[in-house]
Image (spheres, rainbow, N blue to C red):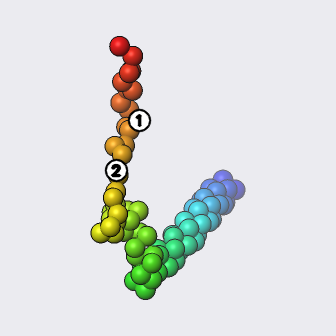
Amino acid sequence: MLQLQRAFDEYSHWQTKEAVLEKELQDLRREAKRHRQFLDRLRRDPDFQDAIARKELGYGKSDELLYRMPEEKADEPQQSQDP
C-alpha cells in the first residue's frame, strides 16, 4: 500500500510539473508571436521604423533639435539645492 501511495504521489508531482511547463510554453509562444509581429512591422512599415529609431535610439530629423535629459538613478541620493 505504501508503494502505491508513493507511486501516486510521484505521478501527481509529474502532472503538476507538466501543467507548469505547459503554461510556460504557452507564455513563450505568445511572447514569440509578439516578437514576430514587432519584427515584421519593423521590416515593412517605414513610419514604425522611424518611431522606433526616435524612441530607442534618440534619432531625429535633420531640421529638429533634440534635448536629452539625464536620467536620475534611484540608488543615488538627491542633492539638495538649499545653501
| Front residue of 24 and 9 | 24
The one of 22 and 62 positioned closer to us in this rendering: 62
User: Quick one: SS at disc 2?
Assistant: loop
Q: Is residue 34 above or below residue 78?
A: below
Query: Quarter of the image containing the N terminus?
Result: bottom right
Whole-percent x and y of residue 80?
38, 21
Kindly indicate the quadrant of the structure image that contains residue 57: bottom left
Q: Is residue 23 visible?
A: yes
Q: CA distance from mark 2 to mark 1?
A: 18 Å
User: Where residue 2 sits: x, y (%)?
Assistant: 66, 53
**Residue 26 point in image, percent of width and height:** 57, 71
Vertically, is 24 above or below 77?
A: below
Q: Which residue is mark 1?
A: 74
Work out whether residue 18 can be spotted: no
Residue 60, which numbered label? none
Q: Amino acid at mark 1?
A: Ala
Q: Is residue 5 left or right of residue 37?
A: right
Quarter of the figure with residue 64: bottom left
Residue lying farthest to the front in this orientation: 63
Which quadrant of the structure image shows residue 73? top left
Q: Residue at x 43, y 70 (%)?
A: 51
Q: Residues within 10 Å of mark 1 (few under 14, many from 20)?
A: few
| Percent position of residue 33, x then y | 52, 77
Which residue does the numbered mark 2 point to in the structure image?
Answer: 68
Direction from residue 22 to residue 55 in the image, left or right: left
Mark whose residue sits in front, 2 or 1? 2
Q: Residue furthest bottom?
A: 44
